[in-house]
Image (cartoon, rainbow, N blue to C red):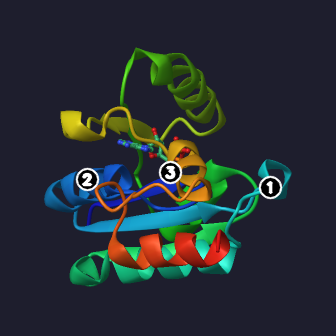
Amino acid sequence: MKRVIYPGTFDPVTYGHIDIVKRAVDLFDEVFITVAINPSKKPLFTTKERVEMLRESLKEFKDKVIIDSFDGLLVEHAKLVGAKAIVRGLRQISDFEFEFQMALMNRKLSGDITTIFLMPHERYTYLNSTVIRNLASLKADVSSFVPPNVQEALMKKFK
Ligand code: ADP
């Protein structure tokens, strides 16, 4: 059973994240999507809301996708759920420096967990959750970037 873990803030989940999940689902038996509980980042959505939005957005993959949250060291959580690899999305060169540093640090912490990078469709390479939160706060239409349930949740937050 090849199990991988896809960690992130997902504040909120976008079609870019979903693109990465679909690619991971094609390659592996089980994908654990894990929401980082990081209060210092002051997320717009609570951990529970982010988990629920991911569940609703990915319900068609429910047989292969497990969604949870974690607090603490990612490599420890990966070991706990039995993941052999960490999946991350690479959008452009600007992601590279941070991702490279984190992947090497995680390898230092735990040599038997490999980080794998997947590239989304070009149409999502300029998309991130911060842009979506900003657009939604200005009442812009974000329907091409996030699933309908996320759009609704954003509208409620900024009404
Ligand atoms: P962000 O605020 O950048 O969306 P996340 O912590 O939610 O941050 O991202 C989790 C993972 O998903 C990271 O590996 C990030 O590079 C990746 N990711 C985020 N947005 C996209 C996207 N549009 N396309 C591909 N990967 C993405």
> Of residues 45 and 59, which is closer to you in this image?
45
The residue depicted at 55 percent of the width and 69 percent of the height is 154
Q: Amino acid at mark 1?
A: Lys
Q: Residue furthest right?
A: 40
Secondary structure of residue under mark 1: loop
Query: Are dots 2 and 3 in contact, CB under 8 Å?
Result: no
Residue farthest left in this picture: 26
Q: Residue at x 22, y 62 (%)?
A: 25
Q: Quadrant of residue 150?
A: bottom left
- Could you tell me which secondary element the residue under label 2 belongs to? helix
Q: CA distance from mark 2 to mark 3?
A: 16 Å
Please identify the quadrant where the C terminus is shown: bottom right
For image coordinates 20% across by 52% down, the residue present is 23
Image position of 43 (left or right of 89): right
Pointer 1 local density, CA inside 10 Å: few below 14, some 14–19, many at least 20: few
Q: Earlier in the sequence, mark 2 or mark 3?
A: 2
Picture residue at 25% right of the left edge, 53% below the top: 19
The numbered mark, 2 or 1, whose residue comes first in the sequence reads: 2
Which of discs 3 and 1 lies nearer the camera? The answer is: 3
| Place of residue 104 in the rendered image (x, y in percent of width and height, measured from the top left) | 56, 24
Q: Secondary structure at mark 3?
A: helix
Question: According to the image, label 2 marks what residue?
Answer: 19
144 sits to left or right of 92: left
Q: Amino acid at mark 2?
A: Asp
- Callout 3 amino acid: Ile
Between disc 2 and disc 3, the foreground one is: 3
Q: Which mark is residue 132?
A: 3
Q: Nearer the viewer, residue 95 or 43?
A: 43
> Does ligand 1 reach within 8 Å of label 2's beta carbon?
yes
